[in-house]
Image: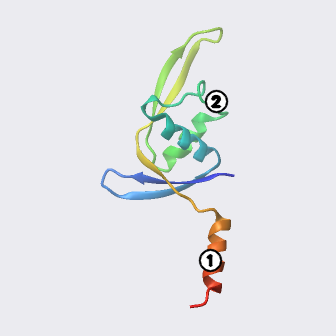
Amino acid sequence: MTMGRFALRAGDGGVQILELNGREEWALSHLLAAGNRGCTPIDTPGPRWSDYIFKLRGRGIEVETVTESHGGPYAGTHARYVLRSKIERQSVESPRVAASVDQQERHATP
């Protein structure tokens, strides 16, 4: 499972580090890549976009929902999700690499 670390910048200048995995990480990564264009379940298929957005909002991430109409044989509306929070992806060291470095440091001779 992929894990991502993100820095969420608050309006007061504070920073909150979020470690996300699974579909939350997947959705936030797609929102970041899409920028102001945002994502829809039509152009970025995912089984439960509304749930991913609900969970991201629960972590304090601001995501705008824009309702759009679409035609075709199943005409109706769909959501476009646009990331409004200031977020940056941070590098994440894999647990194996971190353990390897830790072991090397313990066995190093001064």
Q: Position of residue 94 (x, y in %)?
A: 63, 62
Q: Position of residue 51 (x, y in %)?
A: 60, 39
Question: Relative to 16, is 78 above or below?
Answer: above
Left or right of 94 in this view: 68: left
- Residue 91 — which label? none
Left or right of 85 in this view: 46: right
Give the mark, 2 or 1, whose residue is nearer the N terminus. Answer: 2
Q: Nearer the viewer, residue 84 or 29?
A: 29
Kindly identify the residue that appears in the image at 56 percent across and 45 percent down: 55
Give the secondary structure at mark 2.
loop
Q: Are marks 2 and 1 in contact (CB under 8 Å)?
A: no
Q: Nearer the viewer, residue 90 or 60?
A: 90
Which residue bears the numbered disc 1? 102
Q: Nearer the viewer, residue 60 or 43?
A: 43
Which residue bears the numbered disc 2? 45
Kindly identify the residue that appears in the image at 52 percent across and 45 percent down: 56
- The colour style of the image is rainbow
Kindly identify the residue that appears in the image at 45 percent across and 54 percent down: 7
Mark nearest the camera among 2 and 1 is 1
The amino acid on which the numbered mark 1 sits, given as a three-letter code, is Asp
Q: Nearer the viewer, residue 107 or 34?
A: 107
Give the secondary structure at mark 1.
helix
